[in-house]
Image (tube, helix red, strand yellow):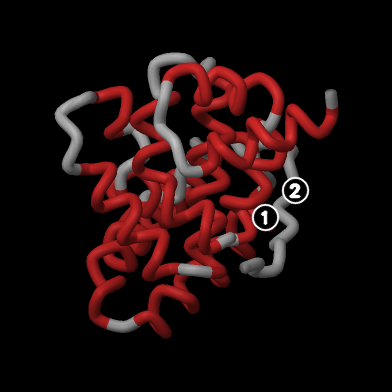
Amino acid sequence: MKNLSFLLMTLCLFSTSAACSSVMVEENWGQFISNIAKGNSQTIAVLPGKIKAISHSITDPQAIELVEAISFALINKPLATLQATEEIGTSADTLVQRFDSGSICSVPAILSYTKSSVLKYYALATEALKKAGKPAAECLNIMQAAMAEIQQEDERGEMKWGNKSFNPVRASG
C-alpha cells in the first residue's frame, strides 16, 4: 500500500486533476508545504497548477499554511517563487488569487508569529529580494510598505503579535 501511495504521489506531482489534488491535500499535505517552504525547485515550478487544482478544496487553515510556506520560499528561491505567484495572479478565480505575489509579498499571516519572528523573517526576505534585483523590486516595495504599517501599529500599541516562532529552513532542490 505504501508503494501505491508513493506511485500516486509521484504521478500527481505533475498532474492537476481533482483526484490528485484531493489525495495530495489528504495524504501529502505536510510534505507539500515543507517542500514549498524550503524552496524546492520542482514543487515551486508546479505550484501554479497545484494551487488551481486545490484552491477550492483546502480549508482556511490550510490556505494560511500555504500562504506562509510560499512566503518562506521567498527567502530561498525569490525569483522562482515570484514567477510562480505572478502566474497565479493571472487567474480570474479569487480563490486562486489568494496566493498571488501581492498577497505573498505583504508579510502575510503575521498575526500568528511573535514580533521577533516577524522581524527575522522580514530581514531574511528583504535581503533575498534585494539580492534578486530588479525582478523582485515590486515585491520588496510591497513588503517594505507592509512592514512600515505593521511597525506603526506596533508603535501605537495596536499590533497583536502571535506566539508562533519562525525558524528558517534551508533551500532544497
What is the x, y in percent for residue 21? 50, 24
Q: Is residue 80 above or below residue 85?
A: below
Which residue does the numbered mark 1 point to in the structure image? Answer: 117
Which image quadrant is residue 173 in? bottom right
Q: Is residue 124 above or below residue 89?
A: below
The type of residue carrying mark 1 is: Ser
User: Badge 2 local density, few (<14 within 10 Å), some, or many (20+)?
Assistant: some
Which residue does the numbered mark 2 point to in the structure image? Answer: 165
Q: Quick one: 160 or 157, which is closer to the camera?
A: 160
Helix, strand or loop at disc 1?
Answer: helix
173 sits to left or right of 126: right
The disc label shown at residue 80, or none: none
Which image quadrant is residue 3 in? top right
97 sits to left or right of 110: left
What is the x, y in percent for residue 19? 50, 17
What is the x, y in percent for residue 98? 34, 32
